[in-house]
Image (cartoon, rainbow, N blue to C red):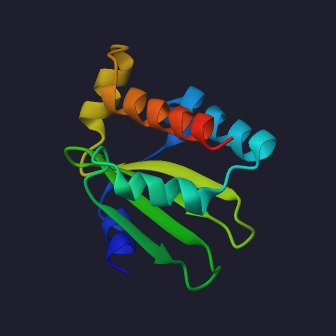
Amino acid sequence: EDIFNLRTMSSVISLKEFDLRLMELLIVAERDLDLEWASLFHSMRQDPLFNKAYSAVVPETGSVVNSFYVYEDILLSFEIDSNSKLDYADIVMRDSSLLLQMKEKKQEFKFIKAIASFILHWIWTNL
Protein backbone atom coordinates (compact mmCIF):
# COMPACT_ATOMS: atom_id res chain seq x y z
CA GLU A 1 0.00 0.00 0.00
CA ASP A 2 2.87 2.38 0.78
CA ILE A 3 4.29 1.94 -2.70
CA PHE A 4 0.95 2.99 -4.21
CA ASN A 5 0.85 6.07 -1.96
CA LEU A 6 4.39 6.93 -3.00
CA ARG A 7 3.39 6.82 -6.68
CA THR A 8 0.48 9.22 -6.10
CA MET A 9 2.78 11.75 -4.40
CA SER A 10 5.57 11.49 -6.98
CA SER A 11 6.34 12.35 -10.56
CA VAL A 12 5.91 9.33 -12.82
CA ILE A 13 7.49 9.06 -16.26
CA SER A 14 6.86 6.09 -18.51
CA LEU A 15 10.08 4.23 -19.29
CA LYS A 16 8.86 4.14 -22.90
CA GLU A 17 8.88 7.95 -23.00
CA PHE A 18 12.12 8.26 -21.10
CA ASP A 19 14.29 5.59 -22.72
CA LEU A 20 12.63 3.77 -25.60
CA ARG A 21 15.66 1.50 -26.15
CA LEU A 22 15.46 -0.01 -22.67
CA MET A 23 11.71 -0.46 -22.97
CA GLU A 24 12.13 -2.17 -26.34
CA LEU A 25 14.76 -4.46 -24.82
CA LEU A 26 12.26 -5.54 -22.17
CA ILE A 27 9.46 -6.06 -24.71
CA VAL A 28 11.65 -8.09 -27.10
CA ALA A 29 13.09 -10.16 -24.25
CA GLU A 30 9.60 -10.94 -23.00
CA ARG A 31 8.23 -11.77 -26.44
CA ASP A 32 11.14 -13.55 -28.10
CA LEU A 33 13.00 -15.06 -25.15
CA ASP A 34 10.05 -15.79 -22.90
CA LEU A 35 11.51 -13.65 -20.13
CA GLU A 36 10.65 -14.90 -16.66
CA TRP A 37 9.95 -11.71 -14.74
CA ALA A 38 9.89 -13.34 -11.30
CA SER A 39 13.37 -14.76 -11.84
CA LEU A 40 14.72 -11.44 -13.14
CA PHE A 41 13.26 -9.53 -10.20
CA HIS A 42 14.68 -12.07 -7.75
CA SER A 43 18.15 -11.52 -9.25
CA MET A 44 17.69 -7.76 -9.12
CA ARG A 45 16.86 -7.97 -5.40
CA GLN A 46 20.15 -9.81 -4.82
CA ASP A 47 22.28 -7.23 -6.63
CA PRO A 48 23.73 -4.18 -4.82
CA LEU A 49 22.87 -1.98 -7.83
CA PHE A 50 19.29 -2.03 -6.61
CA ASN A 51 19.51 -0.69 -3.04
CA LYS A 52 15.98 -1.51 -1.99
CA ALA A 53 13.14 -3.39 -3.62
CA TYR A 54 9.43 -3.48 -2.95
CA SER A 55 6.64 -5.67 -4.27
CA ALA A 56 2.91 -5.19 -3.91
CA VAL A 57 -0.16 -6.83 -5.36
CA VAL A 58 -2.78 -4.60 -6.99
CA PRO A 59 -5.97 -5.87 -5.30
CA GLU A 60 -8.30 -4.96 -8.17
CA THR A 61 -6.34 -6.76 -10.90
CA GLY A 62 -4.02 -9.24 -9.22
CA SER A 63 -1.07 -7.60 -10.98
CA VAL A 64 2.20 -7.33 -9.09
CA VAL A 65 4.16 -4.10 -8.91
CA ASN A 66 7.91 -4.53 -8.40
CA SER A 67 9.81 -1.36 -7.59
CA PHE A 68 13.56 -0.88 -7.22
CA TYR A 69 15.58 2.10 -6.05
CA VAL A 70 18.17 2.61 -8.74
CA TYR A 71 19.71 6.02 -8.12
CA GLU A 72 19.29 8.55 -5.31
CA ASP A 73 15.55 9.21 -5.24
CA ILE A 74 14.77 7.37 -8.48
CA LEU A 75 12.59 4.29 -8.39
CA LEU A 76 12.12 1.94 -11.34
CA SER A 77 8.69 0.34 -11.19
CA PHE A 78 7.34 -2.60 -13.21
CA GLU A 79 3.79 -3.90 -13.20
CA ILE A 80 3.40 -7.52 -14.25
CA ASP A 81 -0.15 -8.62 -15.01
CA SER A 82 -1.82 -11.82 -13.84
CA ASN A 83 -0.60 -13.55 -17.05
CA SER A 84 3.04 -12.73 -16.18
CA LYS A 85 3.29 -10.10 -18.93
CA LEU A 86 4.72 -6.61 -18.58
CA ASP A 87 1.91 -4.10 -18.19
CA TYR A 88 4.10 -1.04 -17.68
CA ALA A 89 7.53 0.17 -16.60
CA ASP A 90 7.87 3.61 -15.05
CA ILE A 91 10.44 5.85 -13.48
CA VAL A 92 9.10 7.29 -10.23
CA MET A 93 10.77 10.21 -8.49
CA ARG A 94 10.07 13.13 -6.24
CA ASP A 95 10.56 15.76 -8.93
CA SER A 96 10.95 14.93 -12.60
CA SER A 97 12.04 18.40 -13.71
CA LEU A 98 15.77 17.69 -13.22
CA LEU A 99 15.48 14.39 -15.05
CA LEU A 100 13.65 16.02 -17.95
CA GLN A 101 16.21 18.84 -18.14
CA MET A 102 19.01 16.29 -18.32
CA LYS A 103 17.14 14.39 -21.03
CA GLU A 104 16.63 17.56 -23.08
CA LYS A 105 20.37 18.21 -22.89
CA LYS A 106 20.95 14.59 -23.98
CA GLN A 107 23.06 13.90 -20.91
CA GLU A 108 23.81 10.29 -20.21
CA PHE A 109 21.96 8.49 -17.50
CA LYS A 110 24.36 6.08 -15.87
CA PHE A 111 21.56 4.35 -14.01
CA ILE A 112 19.77 3.49 -17.30
CA LYS A 113 22.99 2.04 -18.71
CA ALA A 114 23.55 0.07 -15.53
CA ILE A 115 20.02 -1.35 -15.61
CA ALA A 116 20.30 -2.26 -19.30
CA SER A 117 23.68 -3.93 -18.69
CA PHE A 118 22.31 -5.87 -15.73
CA ILE A 119 19.30 -7.10 -17.73
CA LEU A 120 21.38 -8.03 -20.79
CA HIS A 121 23.84 -9.92 -18.60
CA TRP A 122 21.00 -11.69 -16.80
CA ILE A 123 19.39 -12.67 -20.12
CA TRP A 124 22.72 -13.92 -21.48
CA THR A 125 23.44 -16.08 -18.43
CA ASN A 126 19.88 -17.47 -18.33
CA LEU A 127 19.48 -18.51 -21.96
Percent across and percent down for residue 124 are: 61, 34
Q: Residue at x 42, y 52 (%)?
A: 44
Instruction: Point out the image quarter for the N terminus.
Output: bottom left
Percent across and percent down for residue 14 are: 51, 44
Q: Nearer the viewer, residue 69 or 107?
A: 69
Percent across and percent down for residue 104 are: 37, 18
Q: Is residue 80 left or right of residue 28?
A: left
Of all residues, the one furthest to the left in this rendering is: 72
Q: Which of 80 and 16 is in front in this view?
A: 80
Instruction: Point out the image quarter for the C terminus.
Output: top right
Of all residues, the one furthest to the right in this rendering is: 32
Q: Which residue is drawn at 75% across and 69% down?
A: 83
Q: In this view, does 127 lie to the left or right of 43?
A: right
Please, is residue 115 above or below residue 38 in the view? above
Q: Which of 17 and 21 is in front in this view?
A: 21
Please, is residue 105 above or below residue 100 in the view? above
Q: Which residue is drawn at 25% across and 46% down?
A: 95
Of all residues, the one furthest to the bottom in this rendering is: 59
Quadrant of residue 79 within the rendered picture: bottom right
Q: Which residue is drawn at 52% across and 34% down?
A: 121
Quadrant of residue 101 within the rendered picture: top left
Percent across and percent down for residue 10 are: 31, 57
